[in-house]
Image: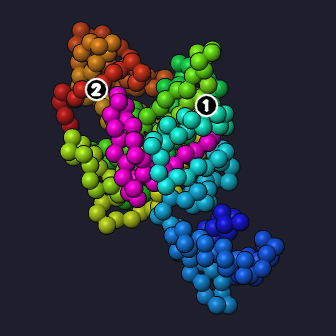
Amino acid sequence: MKTELLRILESRRGEFVSGEELAENFGVTRAAVWKAIDSLRSSGHVIEAITNRGYSLVRTSDALTSEGIRVNLKPSTKISRVVCLEAADSTNNYAKRLAMNGAAHGTLVVADRQTSGRGRHGHTFESPAGTGLYMSLVLRPKVEAEKFQMITVAAAVAVCLAIDELCGGAKERAGIKWVNDVLIGGRKVTGILTEAVSSVESGEIESVITGIGVNVSTREFPAEFADTAGSIFGEGEYLFGRDELCARIADYVMDFAENLEAPEIIREYRTRSILSGKRITYMKNDVKSSGFVEGISENGGRVVVNASGEREILRSGEVFMIRRKVDED
Ligand code: BTN
């Protein structure tokens, strides 16, 4: 009832909805409606109540709650389950455990903080409470293993679209540096870690966990990232709630996962690719090379012209590490 109640108030923002109408809608007493409103308020949702007029939603909570996330998912959402935690070791680990126990496609795990957040290449991902969004999706896409890398591309595009829409032009357009990093104003605000869960018996990939970490209003970063990391919101700024961002990203990822070949995904990636046209140094198969990034291939790889003038495609799985850009923008 709480989720539905919040959904009604959300869909009628700016209006007062009477307690009588709500009570009738749910087939409960007005006292029961009041109790549900009270409980929503305790979760941090700001709801105005005026005698003889009813209830009006001022803003949803900035606290991450499963009802706050559900209410922001679109009606046709493909998210099958929302698990919202105060803390997780890593939402990817948590989602992986659920997947190994049969969790369905579209299971979403979100935490307010992570105690052992993980980044790529064994790095840790700092995940303080209250300021970031740490989410993982269990996906069971019906695609061949080679197409799995498109999931990370789709997740990066999903993050960019969601941030840009919710910022409504208040921020610079979100860009994708390497496929796993989303940047705003030259600073990394999102990292993505996609991992496969394969069956020990068959060796086949049974599910994919896509983990997304967004610095929404994080102010402090480990010293090594102090010059490169950033947040969506500036100091004291509030543009939207984390639950809204989470729901919008999740809906985009789920829609893209239905059709990883949708031209829109690559089109968006190309227009947002920050490295295109730049020189980079990279490690491939333990060999350090440098080259010029020509663009993005049809299947989401980076087309690089290497120092010998040969064109090669770097896929995220193959490229061990982008060390640094040779000529910084
Ligand atoms: C990177 O930048 O190297 C990737 C960072 C990925 C962080 C997210 S936060 C949610 C999910 N859980 C994790 O432990 N990692 C990912």
Q: Residue at x 61, y 31 (%)?
A: 100
Q: Residue at x 66, y 87 (%)?
A: 53
In the displayed structure image, the side of residue 149 where residue 172 appears, left or right: left
Q: Is residue 251 visible?
A: yes
> Residue 253 lies in what quarter of the image?
top right
Dot 1: what SS?
helix
Nearer to us in this view, 65 or 161: 65
Q: Amino acid at mark 2?
A: Ile
Q: Is residue 131 above or below residue 42?
A: above
> Residue 289 lies in what quarter of the image?
top left
In the displayed structure image, the side of residue 25 where residue 48 appears, left or right: left
What range is drawn magenta here? Answer: 106-134
Q: Residue at x 67, y 45 (%)?
A: 80
Identify the residue position indicated by label 2 in the image.
322
Dot 2: what SS?
strand
Q: Is residue 262 visible?
A: no
Asked if the magenta segment contains residue 196, the reply would be: no
Q: Is residue 299 above or below residue 285?
A: below
Q: Amino acid at mark 1?
A: Met
Q: If the image is split into quadrants, where does the C terminus sit?
A: top left
* Colouring chosen for the image of the structure: rainbow
